[in-house]
Image (cartoon, rainbow, N blue to C red):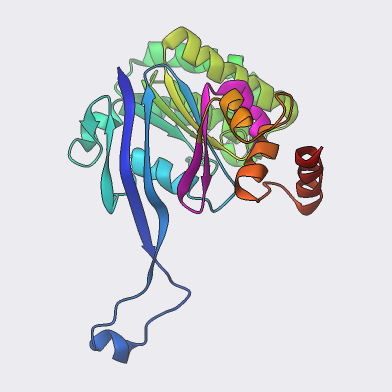
C-alpha cells in the first residue's frame, strides 16, 4: 500500500523583497511570486524511510509543510494512505506527526507536562501516556531530572529529543522528520537515529526525513531524493544514485549531490573537500 502519493506539487509565496507601490497596486499590479516547490512528484510505499536531501532553501521544509497539511498547495495533490491532504485534512492529521527543527512547546512547562498535554489532545489514557512517555524518553537518553524542569532550561538538543518523543507518543503511521537531528551532539544524534530505525522496524512506521546530513540519510533511508531550487533533480537508492553519477560506492552522497547539481551542502572548506572527493 502507498503511504504517500505526491503529484505535481507547486507552492508559491509572495516575494517581499520587491514590494509593489500603492499606486501600482491600484492599477492592478500584483506582487511577484516565487515558487518554493516546483512540480514535485513521488510515491512512498508503507514502511519505507524516504529521504529528501538538499541545502537550506531548496524547498524541503515547504514540501513537508504541504504534506503535513500546514500549507495549501497552489497546484497538485497529496494523498496520505489514500486521503487527500486538502479535502480530508482531519483524517490525515490522525495518521501523521511531524518533528521540525523549530520545535514549538510550552516553554514554561516541563518535558513530561508537554508530553502529557499532547497525549490528552490525542485522547490517550493518562496511565498509558505516562508509561509511554517515560519509555520513549528513557530510550532517547533524556535524564529523569531533566524531565521535570521547564523546557526553556533545557539545551537545544534536549528540547529536540522531547519533540521527537512527542511525535512518537501516538505511534503515527506516517512520521515527518524535518531535520530532526540538527543541533544534537554526536551521541544524541546516534540515539535519535537508532530510535527512528526502531520505530520503523517495530511499529511499521513510514518515515519522510529531510536533511542536509548525507551520512545520516545514507544510514537511515532506503531511497533518497536530491532537491534543489524547489525540484527533485534525482531519486533512487544511494547505490543507484552513485552508479548514475559515476561515483565510487564508497564515496559519500554529498559527493554525488555535488556531481548532480554543482553545489555543496556545507561551508566552503567542506565544499572543497567534497570536490576533491568527486575528482579523485
* Residue 274 found in image quarter: top right
Residue at the outermost bottom position: 23
Q: Nearer the viewer, residue 26 or 118?
A: 26
Which residues, given as a range, are shown in magenta? Answer: 213-234
- Image: 30 above or below 225: below
Q: Could you say where residue 41 lies in the image, as x and y percent from the top left?
A: 36, 39
Q: Is residue 38 left or right of residue 258?
A: left
Whether residue 99 can be seen here: yes
Q: At 68% from the left edge and 22% from the top edge, which residue is drawn?
A: 190
Q: Could you say where residue 147 lies in the image, as x and y percent from the top left?
A: 59, 25
Q: Could you say where residue 152 lies in the image, as x and y percent from the top left?
A: 60, 42
Residue at the outermost top position: 202
Q: Nearer the viewer, residue 93 or 224?
A: 224
Q: At 81% from the left edge and 43% from the top edge, which residue is drawn?
A: 276
Whether residue 154 can be seen here: no
Within the magenta stretch, is there residue 115?
no
- Image: 126 above or below 87: above
Within the magenta stretch, is there residue 226?
yes
* Residue 95 found in image quarter: top left
Q: Nearer the viewer, residue 146 or 30?
A: 30
- Image: 263 above or below 133: below
Q: Could you say where residue 30 lies in the image, as x and y percent from the top left?
A: 30, 77
Q: Is residue 234 left or right of residue 44?
A: right
Amino acid at each position: 500500500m502507498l503511504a504517500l502519493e505526491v503529484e505535481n506539487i507547486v507552492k508559491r509565496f509572495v516575494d517581499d523583497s520587491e514590494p509593489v507601490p500603492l499606486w501600482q497596486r491600484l492599477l492592478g499590479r500584483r506582487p511577484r511570486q516565487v515558487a518554493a516547490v516546483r512540480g514535485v512528484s513521488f510515491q512512498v510505499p508503507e514502511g519505507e524511510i524516504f529521504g529528501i536531501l538538499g541545502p537550506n532553501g531548496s524547498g524541503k521544509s515547504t514540501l513537508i509543510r504541504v504534506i503535513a497539511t500546514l500549507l495549501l498547495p497552489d497546484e497538485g495533490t497529496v494523498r496520505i494512505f489514500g486521503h487527500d491532504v486538502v479535502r480530508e485534512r482531519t483524517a490525515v492529521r490522525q495518521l501523521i506527526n511531524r518533528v521540525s527543527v523549530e520545535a514549538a512547546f510550552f516553554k514554561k512547562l516541563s518535558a513530561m507536562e508537554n508530553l502529557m498535554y499532547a497525549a490528552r489532545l490525542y485522547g490517550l489514557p493518562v496511565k498509558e501516556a505516562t508509561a509511554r512517555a517515560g519509555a520513549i524518553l528513557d530510550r532517547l537518553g533524556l535524564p529523569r531530572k531533566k524531565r521535570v524542569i521547564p523546557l526553556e532550561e533545557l539545551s537545544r538538543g534536549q528540547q529536540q529529543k522531547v519533540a521527537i518523543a512527542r511525535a512518537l507518543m501516538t505511534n503515527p503511521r506516517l512520521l515527518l522528520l524535518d531535520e530532526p537531528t540538527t543541533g544534537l551532539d554526536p551521541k544524541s544524534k546516534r540515539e535519535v537515529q537508532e530510535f527512528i530505525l526502531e520505530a520503523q522496524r517495530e511499529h511499521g512506521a513510514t518515515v519522510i526525513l529531510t536533511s542536509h546530513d548525507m551520512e545520516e540519510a545514507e544510514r537511515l533511508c532506503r531511497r533518497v531524493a536530491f532537491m534543489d531550487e524547489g525540484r527533485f533533480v534525482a531519486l533512487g537508492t544511494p547505490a543507484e544514485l552513485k552508479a548514475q553519477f559515476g561515483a565510487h560506492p564508497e564515496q559519500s552522497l554529498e559527493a554525488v549531490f555535488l556531481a548532480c547539481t554543482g553545489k555543496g551542502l556545507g561551508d566552503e572548506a567542506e565544499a572543497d573537500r567534497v570536490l576533491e572527493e568527486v575528482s579523485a
